[in-house]
Amino acid sequence: MNPSTPAADAALERAQTQVEASRSGQTPRPVVQGFFDEPTHTATFVVHDPMSRAAAVIDSVLDFDPASGALSFTAADRVIDYVRTEHLTVAWILETHVHADHLSAAPYLQGQLGGRLAIGRGIVAVQETFGKLFNAGTAFARTGAEFDRLFEDGDRFGLGGLEATALHVPGHTPADLAYVIGDAAFVGDTLFMPDYGTARADFPGGDARQLFRSIRRLLSLPDATRLFLCHDYKAPGRDRFVTETTVAAQRAGNVHVRDGTAEDDFVAMREARDRTLAAPRLIMPSIQVNMRGGRLPEPEENGTRYLKIPLTTGRG
């Protein structure tokens, strides 16, 4: 979705109105609890309606040891314990995009807590790209069928008495979504804390210019909108992890994209910076699992599941 189209403008206007209604008390203000996974620097959020106690889990983490191939559920079990202790009912398990830095625990959480699994419709393009890269074969349908709902830009959904809007914010990947729920926006990897900047845009289908426009779209939400970030890496001089900020703080102080930053300057900075970045440590296993909605590849004839690593020689 091009952020300047009339349909996109209407979607943003609805999200702005929704935030204002939540801030003014016309609609409930969501309760948000974060769970930070330090090994992957990932924040999972549980957001719920304080009246109905309907909840959504956003960007969950499955523990994975790449050296041994061992999977475990410590991070996800923390979420489950919280949901049960708070007597919440999970309506949605949401992914902001196909993560390249951690494996999703969505199927495990869905089995324990219920809820519908959702992502943006752009997942189909991601599946097509990475289905070829990993030679997934014809059994991998590339239709997004692993998810219960594929959101379009501007789609609205409910969480008890809370209003929620999905906004397409491509650039980091072609499929990124932000979920605006009440006065809270869950922005995935588009933005980091103001002192750290913005996401990379050099993955397949990524685009620094799209990323700039998507970020400016998010920063058109009301200043008091609470922004919840999928990652934090502690900028130099900061000694704690932080994953919540506001639109106003980003507009005033984001080191990459504060107010007054020109689009061409951002693109030049982002593309130069991306050329210096190594691939995420878990990119190969993460994408293979996450493009399947967090499901593992099917077992081979010996009953064992395998993840692939495409090899290159480094020669032309």
Image (cartoon, helix red, strand yellow):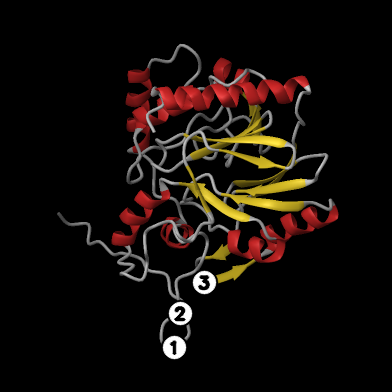
The secondary structure type at the circle numbered 2 is loop
**Residue to which mark 3 is pinned:** 69
Foreground of the two, 309 or 84 = 84
Quadrant, the N terminus: top left
> Compared with residue 146, is residue 171 higher up or lower down, i.e. above or below?
above
Q: Are marks 2 and 1 in contact (CB under 8 Å)?
A: yes
Residue 256 in sight in this render: no
> Compared with residue 46, is residue 62 higher up or lower down, i.e. above or below?
below
| Residue 302, numbered circle | 1
Crowding around mark 1 (Cα neighbors within 10 Å: few <14, some 14 to 19, many 20+) is few
The amino acid type, in three-letter code, at marker 1 is: Asn
* Residue in the picture at 66% in, 66% down: 111
x, y percent for residue 230: 58, 42
The secondary structure type at the circle numbered 3 is loop
**Residue to which mark 2 is pinned:** 299
> Compared with residue 5, is residue 91 higher up or lower down, i.e. above or below?
below
Foreground of the two, 164 or 175 = 164
